[in-house]
Amino acid sequence: MRLSLMPRDRTFFDLFLEAGQNSLRAAKLLDEMIGGWPDSRDLNREILKAEQEGDRITHDIIRRLNSTFVTPIDREDIYALATQMDDIVDYTEEAADFLGLYRIEAPMEQAQALTRVLVEACENLAEALERLRDFQGLEHYIIEIHRLENDGDRISRDAVASLFSNGIDPMVVIRWKDIFAVLENAIDATETAAQIIEGIVIKNS
Amino acid sequence: MSSPYAIRLAVVDDDSGFVTVLAKRAEAAGWQLRTVPGAIPPEELVAMKLNALLLDPGVLGEEAWDYLEQVCGMLPDLGVLVCTAPTSVGQRVRGLRLGADDWIAKPCHPEEAMARIEAVSRRHRAAKADLDVGPLVAGELEIRPDRFQAYVGGNSVDLTRREFELLEMLAESTGRVHERGAIYQRVWGYAMAHGDRSVDVFVRKLRHKLEKRSPGWTYIHTHFGVGYRFDPEPLAGGEPLAPSRSQAFHKLDTNA
């Protein structure tokens, strides 16, 4: 067991836990919103609130980082993980916003498939963050997030390719290509967060 | 004088300079212009809801005459103009006799081409207006193409333009099952992207509005894995004096 001569602020782990739950909430709301679009457009407000909550959590982590002398894990890891968790919610909110801004008439099945992958990735990420303070039992969740990111890549590639069939409205192509890209970014952000967690575990176990 | 109508025009021509200038002028006039790479099937032209087609037979080569005959035969409401390099009298006569509405020899000024397209569209529009019959009646529903709206007992169903076009398209072929892709092509005017749920969403909205105004009837039926069928049927206990299906749907002649 590693001994520490200095007291370490464990609040960071609580804040990461909050960030994980917040990203999962935002992802679930987006999944529900896309599945029920256009009747579910009011959920955009809830997703915006989650995005603001994500900003608040990130701000709390960085403020605490600046005022803490000894941190439980490397400073750069705390900073990288906090910003990455924030990115997940930002991309989620961006995708929700695009539905309204681009005047999307109806959902695409591939977008629904991508939001389901995002929800699963966020569930695994939230579980991993819950176990971060012990630096143990995270491997399964990290592997699962990598697998989900691969699934997301495949769905997104197929979805974009399907837009380039002959005779499809160019406006549909432009709108959905952007939305698929943002959804893929959100899923990619979960993988980057998982990679940072993996690095933290290696350094601290 | 510019046309009071937004003309929907498709251009089959590989003369990029001419097409570019024409497209700019058409856009300025509020037209919708689509360039198509070659002999696009007549069904796709129907889906584009065009007023006119500007065709250079040189792009299609040997098939040009057959294609011209096929398009003019299948789409009598479509204004077809041939715009091509100088040709013999015999070729021009052949093209016009196959069904082309006008023949323009290149080089031609895009403004003149537009004026001729307008003239052809105007004539077709006038001819179509003479042929148009009155509202469709289906169950309790009165579908009024002249108002882009449907009514139940004189009350508007409050359909949007898209919802009305979907209802009109389905009601015009009552009893027939339409595949989702075919519905999308006819109503939206483009091919349906794989996974697009637009047809389902609009059918749901349409059903909701119809149920609200005409709760004793069901109009749109789902064929799982295929698409939808329009067939007005009274719900059990909803309409005691419900007519049979053949009675439930008929076209009214406003002139009668």
Image: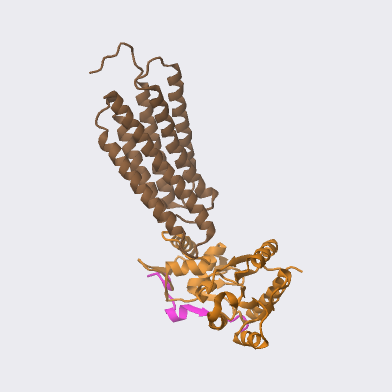
Chain colours: A brown, B orange
Q: Is residue A11 left or right of residue B81?
A: left
State the image quarter where residue A83 is shown: top left
Q: Nearer the viewer, residue A195 or B142?
A: A195
Could you say where residue A38 lies in the image, as x and y percent from the top left?
A: 48, 53
Residue at (43, 46) in percent of width and height = A183
Q: Is residue A147 left or right of residue B197?
A: left
Of the 4 image quadrants, the one containing the N terminus of chain B is: bottom right
Q: Nearer the viewer, residue B141 or B8?
A: B8
Q: Nearer the viewer, residue A7 or A14?
A: A7
State the image quarter where residue A134 is shown: top left
Q: Main structural element of the magenta stretch: helix, strand or loop?
A: loop
Q: Nearer the viewer, residue B155 or B194?
A: B194
Is residue A130 visible to the viewer in this orientation of the structure? yes
Q: Is residue B117 left or right of residue B61?
A: right
State the image quarter where residue B118 is shown: bottom right
Is residue B217 visible to the viewer in this orientation of the structure? no
Could you say where residue A145 lies in the image, as x and y percent from the top left?
A: 32, 40
Q: Note whether B169 is above or below A7 in the view shown.
A: below
Could you say where residue B105 lies in the image, as x and y percent from the top left?
A: 69, 78
Of the 4 image quadrants, the one containing the C terminus of chain B is: bottom right
Query: What are the residue bounds of the magenta stretch?
Result: B232-256
B13 magenta-colored:
no
